[in-house]
Amino acid sequence: MKTNEVLEAIKNRRSVRSFKNEQIQEDDLNAILEAGIYAPTGMNYQTFHFTAVLNKEKLEELNRRVKNVFAHSEDEHMKHRGENEAWNFYYHAPALIIVSNEEIIPSSGLDCAVALQNIFLAAYSLDIQSCWVNQLRYTCNDPFVRELLTEWGVPEKHFIFGCAALGYNSGVVPQTPVRKEGTISVVK
């Protein structure tokens, strides 16, 4: 089968949930963010916004607020996580990129998903590990969480469609999983 660097990166990138307590380099972060803004968007609107949070104390405060929302959820799975003292929604990564967009744009969620994929692949190409986290999707409109997000520059009318936890791996990178059969149809 045909291959090149990009195809190999797509096949080999894995979500990592254990990070070293070492911040990623600023020039690496800038390259990753730039890769995000080059993602295609519906009608070329480019309405997404990226908020990079690198401050450990601020990330811990965000985690406390997210856990509080989860702890008061009616969903048992979310409630369990919120009440678990050890749970951290971004896996203690030293960097978190919050990807947001206007909800009224029909392609806003898809635009953010494509941007996140660019972010993950760019990070992988720089030997930085990543994990897609979605907990802010469920909590971003909680006033206690929104207050913090707005303070950090997330536009008030934006919804959080996903986040990228980034850092250097402190454990073993998961093996490439076997891909399911029957997921492709080719019509000629």
Image (cartoon, rainbow, N blue to C red):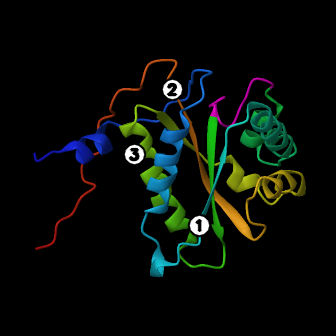
Residue depicted at x 46% and y 82%? 43
Left or right position of 174 against 147: left
Q: Which residue is the extreme one toward the front?
A: 27
Q: Which residue is mark 2?
A: 168
Q: Which residue is mark 3?
A: 121
Characterize the magenta stretch by its predominant secondary structure.
loop
Classify mark 2: helix, strand or loop.
Answer: loop
CB atoms of marks 1 and 2 within 8 Å: no
Task: Inspect the image, locate mark 2, and give the three-letter code of the amino acid beneath it.
Answer: Tyr
Q: Rate crowding at label 3 as few (under 14), some (14 to 19) or many (20 or more) other CA atoms within 10 Å.
A: many
Pick the quarter of the image with the C terminus.
bottom left
Task: Inspect the image, locate mark 1, and give the three-letter code of the amino acid beneath it.
Answer: Phe
Residue depicted at x 46% and y 72%? 41
Q: Which numbered marker is on residue 48? A: 1
**From what the image shows, is residue 63 above or below residue 34?**
above
Which residues lie in the magenta part? 85-94
